Amino acid sequence: MKIALAQINPTVGDVVGNSEKIIARIEEARSLGVSLVVFPELAVSGYPPRDLLLKPRFVRANVEAVQRIAQACTEVAALVGFVEPSSERFGRRLRNAAAYCRDGKVEHVRYKCLLPTYDVFDEQRYFEPGPEVALIEHEGAAIGVSICEDLWNDEQLIGRRLYPRDPIGQMAAAGAKLLVNMSASPFERGKHAFRVKLFGKQAERHGLPILVANQVGGNDELVFDGASTAIDARGDLVAQAKAFEEDLLVVDVDVSGQGVSLPPGRVEPYPQGIAGIHDALVLGTRDYVRKCGFKKVVLGLSGGIDSAVTAAIAVAALGPDAVTGIAMPSRYSSDHSQSDAEVLARRLGITFKSIPIEPMHQAFEVHLQPHFEGRPLDITEENLQARVRGVLLMALSNKFGSLLLTTGNKSELAVGYCTLYGDMCGGLAVISDVPKTSVYALARYINERGGAEMIPASTITKVPSAELRPDQTDQDSLPSYDVLDAILERYVTDENSMDEMVAAGLDADAVEKVVRLIDLNEYKRKQAALGLKVTSRAFGVGRRMPIAARFRYQ
């Protein structure tokens, strides 16, 4: 028989649109002679629906949609992820569920057993875990149906099991011949290789093939990379869908009296390293802009590498006609910054405008001078320039209905090297989870991928500077970015103490300075634009640090 993994890009809350997408895939699968089509986790509602789940009307609409989807299941069956109200008199009111639809009706419903509450996940806020597992029978094969996290409870690879239950082991013990997982697993750097290894170990341990249908697309800060997979009973990858785009992966399944086997099928390549980060940012930008109802974006072009990379990603996501770059030179802006911004805009094919800020900056200084009398120039005057630029960009965003993209990277956001209500203004922070050293790698990759110098070489090689005072460079007040990023990775991602970082060979003074800045600037990050998550620990919903706190982590 043929089983299709329907890797779709749902929009959270768009029950009608998602249902139409699901039905269209069911009809396509039927035309290909598919017996069963598997959709991702919560495909009807989109993942993650968050507090939409607290709205009874939304839950009802999603249940009604499943009934309509079931009616389309003639001559083909489907496993569809949705939200089901719990019939129990205790516990949470909802369950993360999978409907097995066949012959025009919902024949069985299975539930997610393991509910993650770490990083960006908070499923115990909404869902009651499923009861004991039960198999479904399809075309003579006993199938164990699991949902995302149910497959991720492997102490051999994870190091410490998070849950006492083992749904996959229970399904194997109950006599499953095939394991099917409906997933919404977000992208992060290096995660896909670990996923394939994890799934392979589970398949090998139980001697059962595993099919995983993963969601694709961007929903707020999360980007889902798809790459749905088929793993044979030996733990080998035998089929893989496309990454970062919708796909329908059809797997030929051999069913015999002894069990189920998966012959080799289509294996699409997965973009590795910086290529995967690039593709995730492009998809996340495209979906955030379009799903929020925008058609165009605007951003400031400083001539620096961060705004250049952000602009290039926006062009890849939306096309050059949808992108406007604004240069806003000040008295401290170098000639090469203005020229680099113009060259970049021309090579990318985007609209370019220049609005000098000197008259506005000077007006602020004149009006504030009596109130600042007797005090020396300091960061206040530097921030005025950033805030003038923020006002101009927001005005253009408002007037033309364009989404303003912020251009700050993770390293700057970590240590507060950014200005509230200035360069932090905007609706989407495209590279806010990309460390500065990776921004350089992205710039080089963009040029290599395009087969031309889209980002000027001078932008990549120049010394980084905010250009808010004469002869300023970032390293006047910060360690070199390779050192800063090494500390950032260890402190934020690995939760190392300062003593551990120094013992690992990092400079003690640099460690103390960077850690202090990271802790002090939590208040800025709480007010930052939503950013796309591409690392294992991003600033945002997955890192919930207090602001009014006092703890020195030695």
Image (cartoon, rainbow, N blue to C red):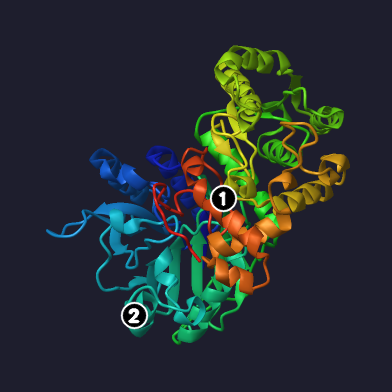
Q: Can you see residue 494?
A: yes
> SS class of the residue under badge 1?
helix
Residue 25 x, y percent position in the rendering: 50, 50
Q: In front: 448, or 532?
A: 532
Decide which of 440, 206 is in the foreground and name it.
440
The residue sitting at 78% across, 31% down in the picture is 470
Nearer to me, 321 or 26: 321
Callout 1 amino acid: Leu
Give the alpha-carbon distance from disc 1 to disc 2, as whole Å. 48 Å
- The residue positioned farthest toward the front in the image shown: 374
User: In the rendered image of this protein, does residue 475 appear above or below residue 423?
Assistant: below
Residue 341 vertical position relative to residue 478 in the rendered view, above or below:
above
Q: Nearer the viewer, residue 198 or 78?
A: 198
Going by the numbered disc 2, the residue's amino acid type is: Gln
Q: Is residue 25 above or below residue 340?
A: below
Residue 41: percent from left, percent from top? 42, 57
Assess disc 2: are there few (<14), some (14-19) or many (≥20) residues with their C-alpha within 10 Å of its C-alpha: some
**Secondary structure of the residue carrying numbered label 2:** helix
Residue 8 visible to the viewer: no
Give the label, 1 or 2, closer to the camera: 1
Rendered image quadrant of residue 56: top left
Q: Work out whether 248 lies above or below 504.
A: above
Q: Earlier in the sequence, mark 1 or mark 2?
A: 2
Position of residue 227 measured from the top left corner of the image (x, y, whole percent):
59, 60
Single out the residue that lies furthest toward the left: 89
Where's residue 427, x and y in %? 54, 33
Q: Which residue is mark 1?
A: 517
Q: Is residue 48 left or right of residue 525?
A: left
Judging by the rendered image, the residue that carries numbered circle 2 is 170
| Quadrant position of residue 490 | bottom right
> For the image shown, how many numbered marks are present on the structure?
2
Specify whether 482 is left or right of 241.
Answer: right
